[in-house]
Image: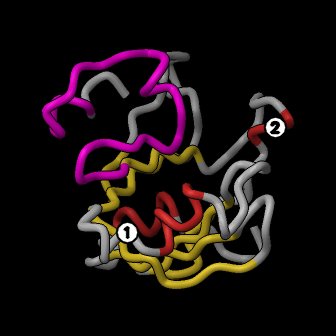
Amino acid sequence: REQIPPHFGEQFNTARWNSGFITLSGNTVLLITLEKEGMGGTFQYQDQFLSPDIFEMQSQNRTSQGSAVGQGVRHHREKGIHVHLFVRKKKRAAGGGAAPFIYCGEVEFAGWEGDRPITIRWKLSTPLPERLQKLLVTDAGD
């Protein structure tokens, strides 16, 4: 997490970079942990790859489609905001430290449904390579 901000000309700040949705000037950074074991009930968002080029995530429970955040998500391209997706399978690495995030590329809004929370679908600009698919894309039966 600490290594991501410099790529956007930012300094790491725990209060800002410990969330999963970071808004910067011209960029939004999504930091997603797929497996939520050990995370509090308020963080049990349903986030998953539906295919190598479609990612589905849930917003915070208080976010509605009509809110400023919701409209920012829906109209990010028109506003000149680039959305970057970073994903990790689990919160902790095998050695017990924080697991690193993997940069999956820039994404475009592809649709949404629901409200409070919103289920948002993002289209990756480049599909995940096969080695990342094996790591991050879970089959519906898993």
Judge the density around disc 2: few (<14), some (14-19), many (≥20) Cα neighbours within 10 Å: few
User: Sequence order check: which comes first, mark 1 or mark 2?
Assistant: 2
Residue at position x 52%, y 71% from top? 55
Query: Is 63 positioned to the left or the right of 122 in the image?
Result: right
Q: Is residue 72 above or below residue 50?
A: above
Q: Nearer the viewer, residue 71 or 40?
A: 71
Query: Is 37 positioned to the left or the right of 89 in the image?
Result: right
Name the residue beneath numbered marker 2. 42
Q: Position of residue 63 (x, y in %)?
A: 70, 55
Q: Is residue 24 magenta?
A: yes
Q: Position of residue 112 (x, y in %)?
A: 64, 79
Q: Nearer the viewer, residue 123 or 34?
A: 123
Name the residue beneath numbered marker 1. 76
Q: Is residue 46 above or below residue 16?
A: below
Q: How is the image coloured?
A: secondary structure
Image quadrant in which you'd find residue 85:
bottom left
Q: Is residue 132 above or below residue 126?
A: above
Q: In 3D space, how far apart are the residues under numbered discs 1 and 2 (Cα atoms)?
A: 26 Å
Q: Nearer the viewer, residue 40 or 100?
A: 40
Residue at position x 43%, y 41% from top? 22
The region drawn magenta spans: 5-28
The reply to whether residue 130 is visible in this rendering is: no
Amino acid under label 1? His
The reply to whether residue 61 is visible in this rendering is: yes
Could you tell me which quadrant the C terminus lies in?
Answer: bottom right
Q: Position of residue 46 (x, y in %)?
A: 73, 59
Amino acid under label 2? Thr
Mark 1 lies on a secondary structure that is loop
Judge the density around disc 1: few (<14), some (14-19), many (≥20) Cα neighbours within 10 Å: some
Image quadrant in which you'd find residue 40:
top right
